[in-house]
């Protein structure tokens, strides 16, 4: 892959040196493969993982073809790009807290979505409250004490806020789940990627936040997705 990307021998030598030093292959190439697509990635931006393709599959099965979709912690915008490929008429919004990720997501999504910089829902236009059909989020969920055991290419070359989920890995996800009801339309869905061993704790947060909860699992991709639904108020 490096040989096909390099235009000259000196450039190839430099790329090989970067890879030997532990830099992610995707950062060197400038792209990552995700859901059969080439997603531009840049240094300082989280590299989309293959397991997150399962999150896309679950979201695509629930999203309305013309619905409002929000991608929180969007990183490179890979999830949004993959959803737009399947449903080009959705109204897509994406948010991330870092300028590097927002710049990269705008590059990938171009004019097909509105990419906003800010902390989770705070970055969204206020008029999305109560009319969002689907929220999808691949937030950091690695416990702080486990970050040091991650591969060096992630730990040293990807932004720590995209990896570190706090003491139990759920600091960001709790905020995402607790605030979801304010944004979701009745019957709307929230989907989040989690670790398999976090299912029980995440289910408690969903339930206490007024969302039904089910957990989907892909052994092939080693991926777990928690799916919540906002029920209509029958009072």
Image (spheres, rainbow, N blue to C red):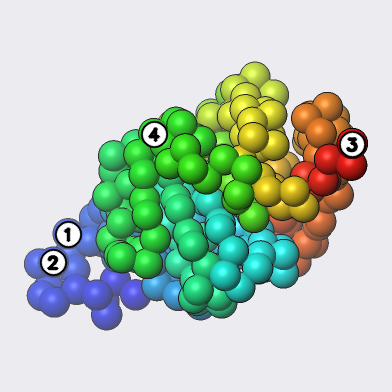
- Mark 1 or mark 3, which has the lower sequence index? 1
Which of 67/198 is in front? 67
In which quarter of the view is residue 39 placed? bottom left
- Measure how far apart labels 1 and 2 are at the Cα level: 5 Å
Q: Look at 28% across and 61% down and name the residue there.
A: 107
Q: How crowded is mark 4: few (under 14 residues within 10 Å), some or many (20 or more)?
A: some
Q: Position of residue 66 (x, y in %)?
A: 57, 70
Nearer the observer, disc 4 or disc 2? 4
Identify the residue position indicated by label 2 in the image: 11
Mark count: 4
Left or right side of 36 for 220: right
- Mark 4 or mark 2, which has the lower sequence index? 2
Q: Circle 3 sits in a helix, a strand or a loop, which is it?
A: loop
Identify the residue position indicated by label 3 in the image: 235
Quadrant location of the N terminus? bottom left
- Mark 2 or mark 3, which has the lower sequence index? 2
Q: Circle 4 sits in a helix, a strand or a loop, which is it?
A: loop
Identify the residue position indicated by label 4 in the image: 118
* Proximity of marks 4 and 2: CB atoms separated by less than 8 Å: no
Left or right side of 10 for 76: right
* Proximity of marks 1 and 2: CB atoms separated by less than 8 Å: yes
Identify the residue position indicated by label 1 in the image: 14
Left or right side of 53 for 224: right
Nearer the observer, disc 1 or disc 3? 3
Left or right side of 234 for 79: left
């Amino acid at each position: 892959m490096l040989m096909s990307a390099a235009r000259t021998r000196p450039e190839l030598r430099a790329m090989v040196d970067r890879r030997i030093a532990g830099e992610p292959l995707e950062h060197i190439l400038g792209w990552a493969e995700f859901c059969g697509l080439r997603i531009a990635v840049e240094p300082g931006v989280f590299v989309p993982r293959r397991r997150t393709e399962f999150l896309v599959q679950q979201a695509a099965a629930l999203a309305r073809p013309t619905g409002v979709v929000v991608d929180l912690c969007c990183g490179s915008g890979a999830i949004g790009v993959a959803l737009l490929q399947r449903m080009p008429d959705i109204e897509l919004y994406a948010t991330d807290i870092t300028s590097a990720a927002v710049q990269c997501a705008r590059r990938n999504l171009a004019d097909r979505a509105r990419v906003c910089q800010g902390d989770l829902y705070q970055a969204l236009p206020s008029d999305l409250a109560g009319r969002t059909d689907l929220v999808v989020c691949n937030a950091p969920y690695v416990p702080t004490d486990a970050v040091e055991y991650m591969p060096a290419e992630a730990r040293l070359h990807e932004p720590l806020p995209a990896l570190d989920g706090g003491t139990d890995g759920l600091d960001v996800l709790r905020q995402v789940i607790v605030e979801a009801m304010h944004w979701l339309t009745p019957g709307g869905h929230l989907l989040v990627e989690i670790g398999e061993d976090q299912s029980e704790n995440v289910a408690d947060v969903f339930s206490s936040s007024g969302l039904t909860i089910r957990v989907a699992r892909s052994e092939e991709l080693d991926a777990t997705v928690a799916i919540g639904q906002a029920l209509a108020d029958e009072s």
